[in-house]
Amino acid sequence: MADLEITAEYRRGWAAALLAAGEWHRSQAKQALILSRRSRFPKNLEREAELHTRAAELVVNLSPDDV
């Protein structure tokens, strides 16, 4: 994206996309934790929930220059 100008509209879209991705990861983490309570093998689902929680924390650090 070095040759493209990053406009205010692009930044708003970027922020909205990051917010949506973070919310998706948080909802996946909640779902995995709920399923882990009902599962015979909860550790796998707990690890999946941790992965999604960490991804939700990291996604806010992305910038348009990363892509």
Image: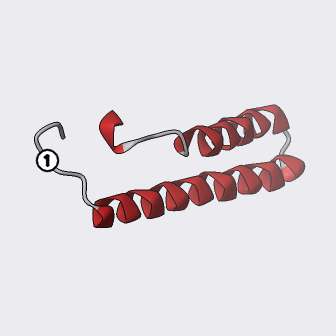
- Can you give x and y, in whole percent of width and height, for residue 7 in the image? 25, 59
Q: Is residue 23 left or right of residue 29?
A: left
In the figure, 26 relative to 1: above or below? below
The image shows a total of numbered marks equal to 1
Q: Look at mark 1 in the image and give the residue it sits on.
A: 4
Q: Residue furthest left?
A: 3
Relative to 14, residue 41 above or below: above
Measuring from the top left, give residue 16's x and y in whole percent: 46, 64
Q: Residue at x 83, y 38 (%)?
A: 42
**Residue 41 seen in the figure:** no
**Is residue 32 shown above or below 66?**
below
Residue 27, by quadrant, is: bottom right
The image position of residue 35, as x and y in percent, is 79, 53
Per the image, label 1 sits on a secondary structure element best described as loop
The residue closer to the viewer here, 65 or 34, is: 65
Q: Quadrant of residue 51?
A: top right
Q: Residue at x 61, y 59 (%)?
A: 23
How is colour applied across the structure in the image?
secondary structure
Any part of residue 35 in sight:
yes
